[in-house]
Amino acid sequence: MAFELPALPYERTALEPHISANTLDFHHGKHHNGYVNNLNNLVKDTEMGTMTLEEVVVAAAKDASKTAIFNNAAQVWNHTFYWNCMKPNGGGTPTGALAAKIDNDFGSYEKFREAFKAAGAGQFGSGWAWLVLDSTSLKVTKTLNADNPLTAGQVPLLTMDVWEHAYYLDYQNRRPDYAQTFLDHLVNWEFVAANFDQAIAA
Amino acid sequence: MNRRDFLHLAAIGTTGWFLAPQGAIAESTSPTNFFSVPPLPYAYDALEPFIDRRTMTFHHDKHHAAYVSNLNRAIATVPELQGQSVELLLRNLSAVPDIIRTTVRNNGGGHHNHSLFWTGMNPNGGGAPSGQLAAAIEQQFSNLSALQEQFNGAGARLFGSGWVWLVLDSGKQLQIITTPNQDSPLMAGATPLLGNDVWEHAYYLKYQNRRADYLKAWWNVVHWAEIERRYIAAL
């Protein structure tokens, strides 16, 4: 069974004016779709073709001969996760157990924000900024290109794509403005909290 | 000395009429101005329709400028590196103190790569190289089309941000290589002759996800006379 491109969880115009329909058309319709097609071509008629996407990501990461499979599989996973990390009228602050854990592990929600923005701005080249659960602690991390916290045994809770294709049509060189807008107007904290609840229950 | 005088002197300097000592120029500008963004050698819209004015404006005025100011800030903290050329810094990156090595690698690389990029293009570019470079290309790649196909393939396959290069390696052979992010071929002991920027910021406003189209179109603006000059200087 081939891997499939999931539909966006909202309309292509739903994140405007923060992320344009034009950006989402290319990002979802071309980039994300391209990773899905590449992955299917690469794993066709191999044992990886029957694995789950997470299994492919973790297995390919351990095999230097499978870099192309890793890159495409991880990018399929990262983008699906990223779409779900956003929603129209998102942003604001987390609530409940996640909010308490953020206060505890970062000092405050403000300190988390600063760390997350710095991770996004500081990822040189293409990559991702993350909030992860690492064992029992929340951490902000950044990864290069397709790299994904799953391969380090961490549980991804929130991600922001900082490949230039994620923001260049709307923000050009102003990556920090994109990161600020992402936190202020786009983060789907319900999704992040659900990831957190599931991770601590596991 | 004001900025206009400085530029005037610098321009005279390149003609050989007035060879200002480097130190004198450095002292006369702001103490953190070790490096500066070279002006584009043509108008922002000169490479249209292959590279658009808007892309050139952000790319030169924002991206390149940011690499230069980050590099200057780092060099300001290490007096013993002040006065070194960016080429020397990149060739001897291991001599740069740990604390600023990554900053120099990324931003020194960004400064040098982009400086080569602007002068490696020209509105009257395209066509084919001549002379010694043409002969070396024929010997190494059979013909220019084969070189271009190999170069475009390497650029298209590069995952993430980076550069695709025609370099002269330490054995004086032409070679096509790619470097991630802003890494310079100088870091590996090779001399960059011709480089194309495949960071998305180099093409996204005009070509979006179609990197292959950008790679193909870019040959229309390659300034072969300058690439040949670099080749002969590196031999």
Image: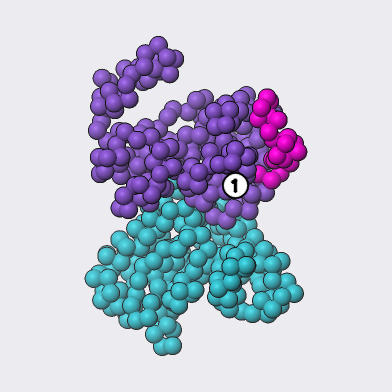
Prevailing secondary structure of the magenta residues: helix
Residue A81: x %, y % from top left: 51, 70
**Chain for colour cyan:** A
**Residue B194 relative to residue A150: left or right:** right
Q: Which residues are magenta?
A: B129-151
Q: Residue at x 34, y 66 (%)?
A: A92
Q: How is the image coloured?
A: by chain
Residue B231: x %, y % from top left: 58, 31
Closer to the camera in the image, A20 or A157:
A157
Question: Which quadrant of the structure image shows residue B7?
Answer: top left
| Residue B203 at least partly seen | no
Q: Residue at x 30, y 78 (%)?
A: A101
Question: Where is mark 1, residue-wise?
Answer: B177
Q: Colour of chain B?
A: purple
Residue type (three-letter) at the residue carrying disc 1: Ile
* Tag 1 subunit: B
Up the image or down, A200 lies above or below B7; here it is below
Q: Residue at x 48, y 28 (%)?
A: B40
| Residue A75 at least partly seen | yes
Residue B21: x %, y % from top left: 32, 21
Q: Secondary structure at mark 1?
A: strand
Closer to the camera in the image, B148 or B177:
B177
**Magenta segment: does it hold A75?**
no
Task: Categorize mark 1 by other alpha carbons within 10 Å: few (<14), some (14-19), many (20+).
Answer: some
Closer to the camera in the image, A142 or B203:
A142
Quadrant of the image containing the C terminus of chain A = bottom left
Closer to the camera in the image, B68 or A4:
B68
**Residue B187 relative to residue A115: left or right:** right
Residue B12: x %, y % from top left: 39, 15
